[in-house]
Amino acid sequence: MRDLDLTTLRLFVSVCETGSIARAGERASIVGSAISKRLAQLEEQLGTPLLTRKRHGVVPTPAGQTLLEHARAMLDSAARIEADMRNFAAGARGQVRILASVSAMTETLADDIAAFLQLPAHRNIQIDLEERVSPEIVRGVREGMASLGVCWDATEMGGLQSRDYCSDRLAVVVPDGHPLAERESVRFEDTLDYQHVSLPVNSAVQVRLQQRAAGLGRTLTQRVVVTSFEAALRIVGAGLAISLVPREVAAPLTANYKVRVVALDEPWAQRRFVICFRDAQVLTPPAQLLMEFLAAAHVPLNAASISSRRA
């Protein structure tokens, strides 16, 4: 099979998005007949129909839908390559891609990266930051999607190396007037009598909470699932549920959302975050600089040690 042509794939995506060869041609300033010819050649190359012609346009076949997903991913990768090369052409001396959990990004990571980039020696380093849940962070770093990851150390690292970064403490956030609101601290088991607003089920903290509930012979009941702590606090403030979130995130926002933060009396409530990477010896110089900067930002003296954590 000949190599797939990105221009043809871009036109195929446009046709699928607009549902019309003519409209895709207008978008790309190409006559429709030229697009039709390219798509016919693509179907011949792949050996399967990709589009079904309807009375008022076209729709992808099952094979076309699969190709559409792959094409979007390929075009996104190509765009990243172009952006990276433009950065080098503009004088950038390096780029670092980081995957990080919502906790790390919300609490300290964004500020730490800003501080790193403010140093004159780092002004030509480009940093791309993307939020993921912890298992996806580990997988992304292991598969080479990013140089560095920042996640909870309770996540199975699958052979990645790591450095200590920072820590936080989970707390229970409840609405004003809730039965738990006036207590100084609560055990996790106490929270299981109430409905929770939670992060996605595959996030590291949610997996851990489900495991803890199962160990107690109980079930954690999720009323709402959200992707940010701000959304969780808004739901709690509305009186719909309670939530377990980092105290460092919740405490400054209690007045905004009419919630109370109650200490969680559990040894595992204290969480440690790590910077993970495939191998310190093969990190690019910019990634090495950033990793060292982050490792020195919050952690105690043992931060200098590199540990290899295996699943």
Image (cartoon, rainbow, N blue to C red):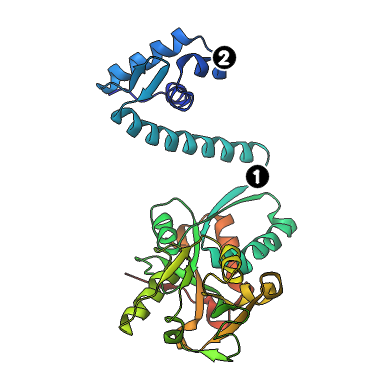
Q: Please, is residue 136 above or below residue 207 in the view?
A: above
Residue 52 position in % (x across, y down): 33, 20
For the point 43% across and 65% down, the residue is 203
Q: Which residue is mark 2?
A: 29
Q: Residue furthest left?
A: 47
Task: State which tag comes first along the sequence, 1 or 2.
Answer: 2
Residue 92's mark?
1
Residue type, mark 2 in image: Ser
Residue 128 position in % (x across, y down): 58, 51
The quadrant where residue 112 appears: bottom right
Tell me the SS state at disc 1.
Answer: loop
Disc 1 versus disc 2: nearer the observer:
2
Residue type, mark 1 in image: Ala
Q: Please, is residue 55 above or below residue 180 in the view?
A: above
- Quick check: can you spot residue 293? no
- Quick check: can you spot residue 61? yes
Q: Is residue 48 left or right of residue 33?
A: left
